[in-house]
Amino acid sequence: MRALIRPRRWAVFISGRGSNLQALLDQSPVQEIRWVFSSKDSAPGLLRAKRAGVPVTVLAKKIDWDALDLELRKRGITDLFLAGFMKMVPASFVAKWEGRILNVHPSLLPMYPGLEAFEKSYQEKQDMGVTVHI
């Protein structure tokens, strides 16, 4: 008997250009993107999502993480992708989505956490790279 594989329904969180979002949109429909959130209303990535027909939401400056969690579940979201999202996500929210959040960070962690990671590693002539972690 073949096991049924339930499709993933992704919400992608962005804050800027959306180049990582575009890479995800260009991939196979196995990882279906159902919703895009941005911490900035001027993020060019919002236009990329709209052009792809993906609903977008600009988050309030003070995010109600509990309400957001409920809305994600209500809409059937199964996984989250933090793709250049420049807000700190509280541990209580992360715990609710444990094992179902992917994060992209522009440095080889633990070196250069936070903003301007590429610039700092380049200026200090250190190894450069990207960390993707659950």
Image (tube, rainbow, N blue to C red):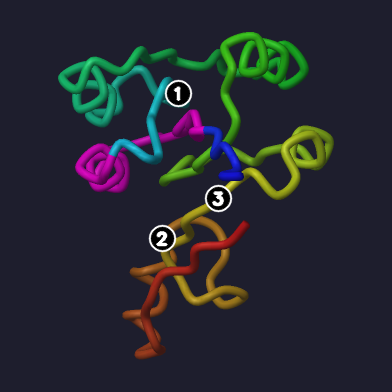
Residue at point 31%, 40% (across, down): 21
For marks 3 and 2 on the same chain, the one whose residue lies earlier in the sequence: 3
Q: Which mark is residue 37?
A: 1
Q: CA distance from mark 3 to mark 1?
A: 15 Å
Residue 89 sits in which quadrant?
top right
Residue 57 x %, y %? 43, 13
Front one among 55 and 43: 55
Q: Nearer the viewer, mark 2 or mark 1?
A: 1
Judged from the image, the secondary structure of the residue bearing numbered disc 2 is loop
User: Is residue 22 shown in magenta?
Assistant: yes
Residue 11 x %, y %? 49, 29
Which residue bears the numbered disc 3? 102
Residue 106 sits in which quadrant?
bottom left
For marks 2 and 1 on the same chain, the one whose residue lies earlier in the sequence: 1
Amino acid type assigned to the residue bearing label 2 in the image: Glu
For marks 3 and 1 on the same chain, the one whose residue lies earlier in the sequence: 1
Amino acid type assigned to the residue bearing label 1 in the image: Phe
Judged from the image, the secondary structure of the residue bearing numbered disc 3 is strand
Residue 48 x %, y %? 20, 27
Quadrant, the N terminus: top right
Front one among 60 and 22: 22
Amino acid type assigned to the residue bearing label 3 in the image: Leu
User: Is residue 31 shown in magenta?
Assistant: no
Quadrant, the C terminus: bottom right
Which residue bears the numbered disc 2? 116
Judged from the image, the secondary structure of the residue bearing numbered disc 1 is strand
Q: CA distance from mark 2 to mark 1?
A: 21 Å
Q: Nearer the viewer, mark 3 or mark 2?
A: 3
Residue at point 50%, 34% (across, down): 8
The stretch of residues the image draws in magenta is 7-28
- CB within 8 Å, label 3 to label 2: no
